[in-house]
Image (cartoon, grey):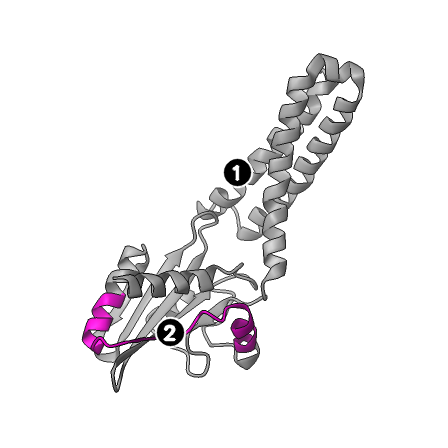
Amino acid sequence: MNISRLPLLVALLALLMLLFAGPGTRLGLWEYGTGFLLMRGAFFAGAAAAALALLFLVIPRTRRNAASTLVLALVVGSVAAWVPWNGLQTVRSLPFIHDITTDTVNPPVFVAVLPLRADAANPPEYPGEEVAQQQREAYPEVQPLLTELSTAEAFDRAEQVARELGWEIVVTVPQDGRIEATDTTFWFGFKDDVVIRVRPTADGSRVDIRSKSRVGRSDVGANAARIEAFLEAFEGR
């Protein structure tokens, strides 16, 4: 084998690990821990391929004979390494929490989804003030939604928004003002559970929402982003 092709082969291997890490987990081919290992492998393989390609480009003979192949290996390897590296930086920049709610004092509780979380690594109970403080610092925009709509109108709108966002509705209990749903993340297929609570106020109603991951210490901001999308869609209707 021409050694100048080695960086491209390694770069393509890194790209394959990157591309299959999430979908393979989503399809149940392996556990999410294996998916993360594949992401890690993609980083090291991609970085190695890029470094090797750069080294060969410095050598006149290999640069002259395989410049285009080496440049392609450099690009592919760099991309394969950058994606997991960037994801790791995002994880490190956010608190290691996975339970986000608009009401940290009296968060909405899960009822109907409890059987679905029976084997979940993360318990359904709210973790308390330590997590609430981290949430307030990282996601200050996650706040209760106050509306002039009646509780019935707010409940109907909340359900419509949840369905439009593609969440799988588990139960709707109008008399309790409670909606429970499950959302599946796009790449890894993680299941996150959501509960919406609608209560009357003197001027209309208050909508609170809570989103919690079933697995993982850090949600990489997914639950906060989900809540913000819901609040934005609710107010925009």
Q: Nearer the viewer, residue 59 or 129?
A: 59
User: Mark 1: few, some, or many residues within 10 Å (few <14, many ≥20)?
Assistant: some
Q: Amino acid at mark 1?
A: Leu
Q: Residue at x 68, y 22 (%)?
A: 70
Q: Nearer the viewer, residue 13 or 48?
A: 48
Q: Residue at x 52, y 80 (%)?
A: 128
Residue 78 placement: quadrant: top right
Side of 83 where 142 appears, left or right: left
* Residue that protrudes farthest toward the bottom in the picture: 202
Q: Position of residue 228 (x, y in %)?
A: 40, 63
Q: Position of residue 130 (x, y in %)?
A: 57, 78
Please name the residue that numbered disc 2 is placed on.
Answer: 110
Residue 96 placement: quadrant: bottom right
Residue 203 placement: quadrant: bottom left
Mark with earlier residue (1, 2): 1
Q: What kind of element bears circle 2?
A: loop
Q: Quadrant of the C terminus?
A: bottom left
Q: Residue at x 63, y 59 (%)?
A: 92
138 falls in the magenta region: yes
How far is disc 1 from disc 2 in space, using C-alphas? 34 Å
Residue 42 visible in the shown view? no
160 falls in the magenta region: no
Q: Residue at x 47, y 59 (%)?
A: 222
Q: Nearer the viewer, residue 122 or 207?
A: 207
Side of 175 where 140 appears, left or right: right
Point out which mark residue 19 bears: 1
Q: Amino acid at mark 2?
A: Phe
User: Mark 2: few, some, or many residues within 10 Å (few <14, many ≥20)?
Assistant: many
Using the image, determine if residue 86 lies above or below residue 204: above
Region rendered in magenta: 131-158
